[in-house]
């Protein structure tokens, strides 16, 4: 991602044993050669001479693609190479991938660019922006995997450009050697062909000649009709090792003479260790050392179980903090007071305004009001937080699954005073992330423990209890709505107030055509730490907005699907997605007694999603039987992977809708494990049907997160359709 910059130009690489190394340069004012020494330190092997190496043609004519994102089940280690290989006309059976290291040259420039300025600029301005955004990403220590940015950022802006430019370099080299026009040469499966003369040869045969050329700044990219790999099913690189057990996750690290550590931090955020008594623990078999971690205690031992049992014997007194008695119910009371106060004092934080919503509401006869709330949620990744660290001879080496390894590196530098050359980050497979592994608390603890035992690798593993009670949670939110209906039953005005605006900024935006809107928020901070959770603020606001739209439809005496369809106006893409979901589910069909359907629509991360759920409440409790999902991401580069992400997002969202509830008592999180923080089980999982609409929109959408937001409101709306009871607070269970 720092390596791939949008509309970058390929520069020549250097030959090593007959292989070509092709790199991506950065824009105006940053000559490609300036980056070479930095890259060569950690990317070249043996006798290689490296020039900005991002895609490598190896001596056996195979292709290796360097991928800067973390693999946490979303398939990015496969789909990004697909995008490059297709533009390069590479033989997919010979393509492999290489994980990028945590280095400034690999900062996620494309993610920063897509987030801040997704449209391209003309000519020299665009070339300059490439260099600017690399510097921005480097200054922010961004090497992030998240926000559904991998394909629409790195893939769209860099992988395709790099592959296309490499292909043009090779064609140019072959044309000169064969003395034929370039437009008479075609490429296929890592070969070049000149059909008129019958000549053909492998890509690698032209490596030396291509290495002397500078690639095009704006190579011609394929149209969807020309795709050979993109949009097709290919076997993922990460599935076989995950099936046969050879995949290495952070928790799998095994080093010689390794010790194990278990940690426990203060139950109330903001507290720290005041005093502790470890005398009993230090006498237990296998215990090596007890370490104070500021906010908690860690025990290092010969085995994890010994460390955990010893930790239970450490007596700790923590400092008290102001919010120690704050409970979940008191937090929502605080939210309500702060929202009221903001209006009373005229201190609302405006999010979006159109027309004169309050004036229309004040003069309306038919006003609908509702209040919704959602609780804090934990990430509950399958793999608990863990980090293996080794401090030796003034260097610190880390093994972990990280969503932002470059950010982790810089955090360790700032925390402990290392130089960049003294930190080595080994990023491994992530057993789930959902935003949790973008946080730096667990690698900090791992480093502290290793520094307490120099020369010895220490593997720290959190217990599930620690994992649940020391999260960066999806925040609890209170949201209030008012709307007035016109004579046609459609909303004429819309007011929404909520607490605490986070990212992404567009999450509370109404997708429907309402002439008068006023969306605003009040700040109401608590001591519970929060962080990104799958789909971020979209998950809360989709539940609020789609539930309230459903209420308006019922109040107007209209069908919830048709009501939404009408309100989408001339947004034809959105209408098609909504209509497709309704047709998939045979919306309005006759169902058994106690069964019902619910529908919801949401656009997030540039992907449009509509979902219909069929729910069986004949037993008195909701059981989701089927979910129909229609989605338009512009173009699904890996359809099988995209469908898997929709399914995954639906299951993750159903867990939250049915069971997810992190509660606080006396300032501390109550839930501790899966017995009281329940997950959706296999016997509860619905049948899921997904239909992809490749509308051809030039701006790609994400896949990892957009499937989650619509499922909770669709489920809640189905429960209402069956029972007449409106769900305004989650979880339903």
Image (cartoon, rainbow, N blue to C red):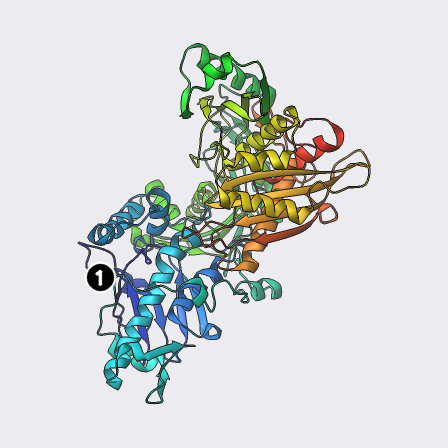
Front residue (pair 411, 603): 603
Q: Residue at x 25, y 49 (%)?
A: 129
**Left or right of 168: which side holds 404?**
right
Which of these two is toward me, 245 or 89? Answer: 89
Would residue 41 appear left or right of 527 to someone viewing this image? left
- Residue at 65% x, 47% y: name it: 583
Q: Is residue 331 visible?
A: yes
- Residue at mark 1: 32
> Which part of the image, by quadrant, shows the C terminus?
top right
Q: How many marks?
A: 1
Give the x, y percent position of residue 723. Answer: 75, 29
Looking at the image, the residue that sits furthest to the left is 29
Up the image or down, 683 lies above or below 171; here it is above
In-front residue for pair 299/158: 158
Label 1 element class: helix
Of the pair 160 and 243, the residue shown nearer to us: 160
The vertical placement of 526 against 30, above or below, is: above
Residue 49 on image: x %, y %: 26, 71
| Residue furthest to the front | 487
For the N terminus, the quadrant is: bottom left
* Place of residue 350 in the rendered image (x, y in percent of width and height, measured from the top left): 40, 23
Q: Position of residue 356 (x, y in %)?
A: 43, 19
Q: Quadrant of residue 207?
A: bottom left
């Amino acid at each position: 991602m720092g390596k791939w910059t949008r509309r970058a130009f390929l520069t020549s690489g250097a030959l090593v044993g007959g292989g070509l190394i092709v790199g991506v340069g950065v824009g105006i004012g940053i000559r490609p050669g300036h980056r070479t020494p930095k890259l060569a330190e950690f990317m070249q092997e043996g006798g290689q001479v490296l020039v900005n190496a991002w895609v490598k043609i190896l001596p056996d004519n195979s292709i290796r693609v360097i991928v800067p994102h973390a693999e946490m089940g979303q398939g990015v280690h496969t789909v990004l190479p697909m995008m490059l290989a297709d533009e390069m006309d590479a033989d997919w059976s010979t393509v492999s991938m290489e994980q990028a290291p945590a280095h400034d040259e690999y900062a996620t420039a494309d993610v920063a660019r897509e987030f801040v300025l997704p449209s391209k600029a003309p000519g020299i301005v665009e070339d300059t922006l490439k260099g600017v955004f690399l510097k921005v990403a480097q200054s922010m220590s961004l090497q992030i995997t998240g926000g559904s940015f991998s394909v629409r950022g790195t893939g769209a802006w860099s992988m395709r450009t790099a592959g296309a430019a490499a292909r043009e370099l090779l064609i140019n080299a072959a044309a000169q050697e064969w003395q034929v026009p370039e437009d008479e040469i075609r490429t296929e499966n890592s070969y070049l062909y000149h059909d008129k003369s019958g000549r053909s040869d492998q890509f690698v045969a032209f490596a030396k000649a291509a290495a002397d050329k500078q690639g095009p700044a704006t190579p011609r990219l394929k149209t969807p009709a020309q795709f050979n790999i993109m949009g097709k099913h290919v076997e993922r690189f990460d599935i076989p090792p995950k099936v046969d057990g050879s995949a290495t996750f952070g928790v799998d690290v095994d080093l010689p003479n390794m010790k194990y550590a278990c940690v426990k931090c203060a139950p109330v955020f903001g507290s720290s260790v005041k005093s502790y008594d470890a005398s009993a623990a230090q006498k237990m078999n296998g215990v090596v050392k007890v370490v104070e971690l500021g906010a908690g205690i860690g025990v290092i031992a010969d085995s994890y179980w010994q460390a955990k049992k010893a930790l239970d014997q450490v007596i700790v007194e923590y400092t008290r903090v102001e919010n120690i008695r704050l409970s979940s119910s008191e937090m929502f009371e605080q939210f309500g007071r702060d929202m009221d106060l903001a209006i009373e004092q005229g201190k609302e934080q405006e999010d979006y305004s159109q027309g004169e919503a309050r004036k229309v509401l004040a003069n309306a006869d038919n006003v609908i009001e509702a209040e919704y709330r959602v609780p804090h949620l934990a990430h509950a990744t399958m793999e608990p937080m863990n980090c293996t660290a080794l401090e030796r001879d003034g260097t610190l080496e880390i093994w972990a699954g990280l969503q932002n390894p470059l950010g982790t590196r810089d955090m360790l530098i700032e925390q402990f005073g290392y130089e960049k050359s003294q930190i080595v980050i080994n990023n491994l497979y992530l057993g789930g992330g959902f935003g949790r592994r973008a946080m730096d608390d667990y690698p900090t603890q791992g480093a502290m423990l290793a520094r307490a035992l120099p020369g010895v690798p220490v593997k720290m593993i959190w217990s599930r209890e620690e994992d649940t009670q020391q999260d960066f949670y999806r925040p609890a939110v209170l949201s209030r709505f008012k709307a007035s209906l016109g004579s046609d039953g459609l909303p004429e005005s819309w007011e929404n107030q909520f607490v605490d605006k986070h990212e992404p900024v567009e999450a509370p935006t109404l997708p429907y055509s309402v002439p008068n809107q006023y969306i605003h928020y009040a700040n109401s901070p608590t001591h519970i730490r929060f962080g990104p959770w799958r789909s971020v603020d979209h998950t809360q606001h989709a539940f609020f907005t789609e539930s309230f739209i459903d209420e308006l439809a019922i109040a107007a005496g209209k069908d919830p699907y048709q009501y939404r369809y009408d309100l989408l106006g001339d947004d034809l893409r959105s209408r098609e997605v909504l209509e497709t979901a309704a047709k998939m589910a045979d919306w309005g069909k006759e169902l058994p007694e106690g069964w019902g359907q619910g529908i919801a629509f949401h656009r997030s991360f540039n992907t449009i999603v509509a979902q219909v759920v069929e729910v069986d409440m004949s037993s008195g409790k909701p059981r989701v039987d089927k979910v129909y999902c229609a989605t338009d991401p512009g173009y699904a580069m890996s359809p099988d992977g995209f469908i898997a992400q929709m399914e995954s997002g639906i299951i993750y969202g159903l867990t939250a809708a049915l069971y997810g509830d992190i509660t606080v008592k006396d300032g501390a999180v109550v839930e501790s494990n899966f017995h009281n923080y329940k997950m959706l089980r296999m016997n509860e999982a619905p049948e899921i049907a997904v239909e992809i609409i490749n509308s051809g929109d030039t701006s790609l959408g994400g896949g990892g997160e957009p499937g989650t937001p619509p499922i909770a409101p669709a489920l809640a709306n189905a429960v209402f359709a069956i029972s007449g009871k409106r769900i305004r607070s989650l979880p339903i269970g």
